[in-house]
Image (tube, rainbow, N blue to C red):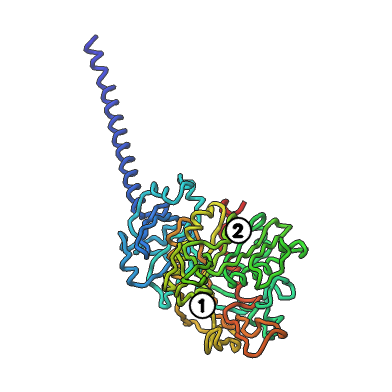
Amino acid sequence: MERQRSFSLKPIRFLVFYFSSIFLIFFSICVFRTITSSLINTHGILFNTPSVVTVQSLRGFNTTYALKNSVLKAVQLRGDEVSSKVGNFSTFEGAQESKNSLLTGNLSLTSFGEVSSVDDFQELGDSVNSSTTFQELNDVIVSDISNGGENNSIRNTIEEKGKVICDITKGRWVIDESYPLYTNAECPFIDEGFNCEANGRLDKDYMKWRWHPQDCEIPRFNATKMLELIRGKRLVFVGDSLNRNQWESMLCLLMRAVKDPKKVYETRGRKITKEKGNYCFKFEDYKCTVEYYVTHFLVHESKARIGKKRVQTLRIDTIDKGSSKWRGADILIFNTAHWWSHHKTKAGINYYQEKDQVHPQLDVTKAFQRALSTWASWVDKYINPHKTRIFFRSSAPSHFSGGLWNNGGHCKEAFEPINKTNFISEYPEKNLIVEEIIRQMKNPVTFLNITSLSDYRPDGHPSIYGRSRNTRRRGTAEDCSHWCLPGVPDNWNELLYYYLQLRTNDDRFVD
């Protein structure tokens, strides 16, 4: 009996050994695949999961960014800057095909540094603590440092599922007989400086041009959809008079969908003038506000004592004193550039201040960079990216011929856009600085690049029609910096509307 029992146990032992071997082989394969996948993702080869990139900035320190597969932007730097920032990547072939959502920019990781693990994403803030938060941060922007393009310009490319849809900076102006989308008679919010038709301008074509990107059709501005998009929200423009130009355009565009104009009003009863800088217009039926807050530099304009005199200074280390009004907005559109070209800011003599020190002289480029860093720090600290969509509009070009604004510069001879497909102008250094600052930020910021397309439009400025016939005097300086309404800023707002439409499925913005 014992011999027979012993013989019967052998098949059982064999089966146990057989299945144990199969389990060990299967387990080893799973472990191997897991380790391999982890290594690949850690080195940024795939875009299926977010990674973290350490980018060497122009100022020589590292900042951690979320590399998200939805939105990226391009920043171009000079060759010497690029060569000094090259990290562990030499090429990144196939990256264009592997992104599976939305791209703004030409992706090139030749300038990115060491890739860290997703765990390091905690440096971006306490609120980012799980993989689900990457879905909420659907608009984190990582800037690409590349050196392509003859005019050293920046491409804003929209890409979805590996297919390029639109490069909004490349295109042409076309006559659209359905334009303008409103008239100065229909919109009570155009102030005298932008109301060219009321001030006696007789030609009308400047209102009918529409920007047409070469790769796509930008949707026509739909006032009803835009109002639904901002229902119950705050749309806030912050910046200089060029942002007021765009803000007034937005008010006029939205009024086309308002059935009762009496239900749109300034909450404190103010009328739009150049003297009063802060406005809040309520659209009662939609329970939303469209606001504008003036700040020339985004940082605090102050005074300091130098010797026995108190002089005006610019506190480039302190945010503008009106910044508390910007907080809590659902959409923020910032700008600054125009005032940085004035004589006092360009000279930089006893003007720029940090803490108690007034710099005897400071280069305007360095001052601009430090001021923008102050703004960026404020945004990262006080703006909740899960609530607020942030834009920074690029600088708008001026078109003075024969001098500057204060010594005979003019543009009244321009009656149509520049019709040259090979038209190239120097890309503003301020834009490059803004893009570099944005690239270093924790919060996602969309760079609304209107510089190149606006550069084709010398005909769009008020010129001598920035004043009414009664107040216009011979020898008055022409305005070749701001824009007539209706006109070019309506196209800026169409681009803004386009970007916001791309986000309608983002729960962080749309309820």
Q: Is residue 53 visible?
A: yes
Q: Is residue 161 visible?
A: no
Task: Tell me: 86 left or right of 484.
Answer: left
In this view, the residue farthest toward the left is 3
Q: Where does label 2 land, which residue? A: 325
Amino acid at circle 2: Lys
Amino acid at circle 1: His
Q: Is residue 66 above or below residue 498?
A: above
Q: Position of residue 49 (x, y in %)?
A: 42, 51
Local SS, label 2: helix
Q: Position of residue 314 (x, y in %)?
A: 50, 68
Local SS, label 1: loop
Q: Residue at x 21, y 12 (%)?
A: 3
Q: Is residue 507 above or below residue 170?
A: above
Q: Residue at x 59, y 69 (%)?
A: 243
The one nearer the camera, 503 or 24, is 503
Q: Residue at x 56, y 74 (%)?
A: 212
Give the alpha-carbon distance from disc 2 to disc 1, as whole Å.
Answer: 27 Å
The one nearer the camera, 59 or 150, is 59
Q: Where does label 1 land, which residue? A: 342
- Say which quarter of the image contains residue 9: top left
Task: Tell me: 409 left or right of 144.
Answer: right
Q: Position of residue 1 (x, y in %)?
A: 24, 9
Task: Tell me: 221 left or right of 16.
Answer: right
| Mark 2 and mark 1 residues within 8 Å of each other at the beta carbon | no
